[in-house]
Image (spheres, rainbow, N blue to C red):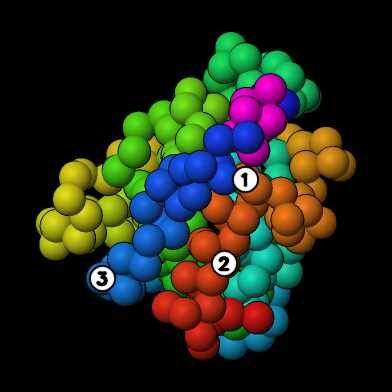
Amino acid sequence: MSRSSVRMVAMILTVLAGAVACRAGNGTSAAVPGPVADEARATAPGKQTVVVAGGCFWGIQAVFQHVKGVVSATSGYSGGTVKNPDYEAVSSGETGHAESVQIVYDPSQVTYGELLRVFFSVALDPTEVNRQGPDSGTQYRSVIFYGNDEQKRIAEAYILQLNQAKVFSKAIATQVVPLKAFYKAEDYHQNYATLHPDNPYIVYNDAPKVANLRREFPELYK
C-alpha cells in the first residue's frame, strides 16, 4: 500500500470501522479444517522456511509472530522480476512482486500444514483476487511460495481439500508457485503492527487477525 493510500484509509476508517476489514477479521475461521496431508513433526529442533503473501505484509507478519514455533517473520517482496526492489517500485505494481512474509519455524513445534491452516483461517481471505481488505493490486495477491516439492505437494493438496469441502463460498484464489527470491523490506515496515498498534489501519485490519488467532488457535498462540 502506498503512503497516500494509508493516509486515506486512516481518514475513512473511523467512519467505516470494521466494514473494510478482510474476511479473516470476522470470526469465520473456525470452519477451516486442518490439512489431511502434512509433513511429519520433527523429533529434534531445527529451522525450516516458508514464504507466503496475502495483502499488506504488516498483518501477515503480525499473525505469524504470534504462532508458537515460529522463530521469525520478516516482511519483504517475492514473485517479481526485479532484483532488490524497493517499496515504491513494488507499490507501482510494475515489478511483479507481492508483499510477502518469510516465516522461519521450528518443525518440532509446528508443522508446515499447521502454518498453512493459520494462513487460510485468520491471515487473509484466500478467495480474493489481487486484493485484501482496502488494498488492491497484484502486489496484494495471495500466494504460497514453495521451497521444495514437499511444500508444493502439501499446499496443493490442502487447497484441493478445502475447495472440495466447500469451506469457502468461492474457490480459493491462492497461487502456489516456486520461490525464486525473497527480498527483505525496508526497516520501517518490520514489526509495523507491534510498533504502531494505534494506527487506524492496524486497529481495523490487522489487530482482529491476531485476536482471531488467539481465539481459534489457543494451542498455537504465543
Give the mark nearest the N terminus, 3 or 2: 3
| Extreme residue toward the front, this view | 15
Where is residue 151? Give x, y as percent. 45, 55
Where is residue 134? Give x, y as percent. 48, 35
Q: Amino acid at mark 2?
A: Val
Give the class, few, some or many, for how many residues have Cα within 10 Å of label 2's Cα (few <14, many ≥20): many
> What residue range appears in magenta?
4-10
Q: Which residue is mark 2?
A: 210
Q: Amino acid at mark 3?
A: Ala
Q: Which residue is mark 3?
A: 31
Q: Which residue is mark 1?
A: 201
Of tags 3 and 2, which is closer to the observer?
A: 2
Residue 175 appears anywhere in the view: yes
Where is residue 196? Give x, y as percent. 78, 53
Q: Main secondary structure of the magenta part?
A: helix
Residue 124 vs residue 97, the one in the foreground: 124
Residue 110 vs residue 117, the one in the foreground: 117
Residue 40 appears anywhere in the view: no
